[in-house]
């Protein structure tokens, strides 16, 4: 892959790990554009994620997500906040790892539960046991997040600014974002 001065940064991690707030602030710090893959899917379809799950199931949503990840990950100078399950698709993992710097925002199930408790836009949590569901998802997804991450940052109990500072420092050591 040709190296670019404007290498993109891709945030992966479970729901509630802070990908959107961290992504927005990190993009501002780097002078990049922030894009959220779930928001992009909603923009393109004109409906919310729960509606897509209801009409097309998870498989239909994942197909849309794979297409959006393919397109967005080819862009330069963006910070991309991916959906928590984006890494389930082997093609998406491969593209993210090859096309930019992947940052895994590591978060405990307890922290996820606290951050997602009031959300009405997370169809995988429409269950009697959200904690159990989050633990199941983490068991499957956590090794996949780690497998493609160039940088891992723990987000539990931390302010967005602190997480962004740690990521920016790590990127700076990689020669990315030093135009600050």
Image (spheres, rainbow, N blue to C red):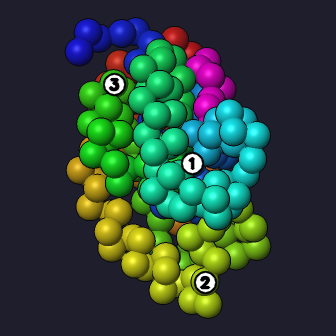
Quarter containing the N terminus:
top left
User: Is any atom of residue 128 visible in this view?
Assistant: yes
Query: Is 155 in front, or is 109?
Result: 109
CA separation, marks 2 and 1? 23 Å
Residue 76 in magenta? no
How far apart are the alpha carbons under marks 3 and 1? 18 Å
The numbered dot on residue 174 is none
Q: Nearer the viewer, mark 3 or mark 1?
A: 3
Q: Earlier in the sequence, mark 2 or mark 1?
A: 1
**52 w.r.t. 77: above or below:** below
Residue topped by disc 3: 99
Q: Quadrant of residue 171?
A: top left
Where 93 falls versus 172 (above or below)? below
Q: Alpha-carbon neighbours of circle 3 within 10 Å: few (<14), some, or many (≥20)?
A: many
State the SS at label 1: helix
For residue 127, the mark is 2
Mark nearest the camera among 2 and 1 is 2
Horizontal and vertical percent position of residue 69: 46, 34
- Write the start and end of the magenta stretch as one range: 28-36
Q: Is residue 47 above or below residue 176?
A: below
Image-quadrant location for residue 50: bottom right
Mark 1, residues whose alpha carbon is within 10 Å: few (<14), some, or many (≥20)?
many
- Looking at the image, can residue 172 be seen? no
In terms of depth relative to the viewer, which is nearer, 174 or 60?
A: 60
**Residue 81 in the image: x percent, y percent?**
55, 41
Q: Position of residue 52 (x, y in %)?
A: 64, 54
Q: Could you classify mark 2 by the number of other residues whose Cα lies within 10 Å: few (under 14), some (14-19), or many (20 or more)? A: few
Residue displayed at 42% across by 29% down = 70
- Residue at label 1? 19
């Amino acid at each position: 892959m040709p190296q670019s001065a404007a290498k993109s940064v891709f945030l992966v991690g479970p729901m509630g790990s802070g990908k959107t707030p961290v992504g927005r602030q990190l993009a501002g710090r780097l002078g990049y554009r922030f894009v959220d893959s779930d928001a992009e899917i909603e923009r393109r379809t004109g409906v919310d994620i729960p509606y897509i799950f209801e009409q097309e199931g998870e498989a239909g949503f994942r197909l849309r997500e794979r297409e959006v990840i393919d397109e967005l990950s080819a862009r330069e100078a963006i910070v991309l906040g991916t959906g928590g399950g984006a890494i389930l698709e082997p093609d998406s993992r491969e593209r993210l790892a090859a096309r930019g710097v992947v940052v895994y925002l590591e978060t405990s199930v307890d922290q996820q539960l606290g951050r997602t408790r009031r959300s009405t836009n997370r169809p995988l949590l429409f269950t009697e046991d959200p904690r159990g569901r989050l633990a199941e998802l983490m068991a499957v997804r956590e090794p996949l997040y780690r497998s493609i991450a160039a940088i891992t940052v723990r987000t539990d109990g931390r302010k967005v600014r602190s997480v962004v500072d740690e990521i920016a420092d790590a990127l700076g050591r990689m020669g990315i974002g030093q135009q600050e």
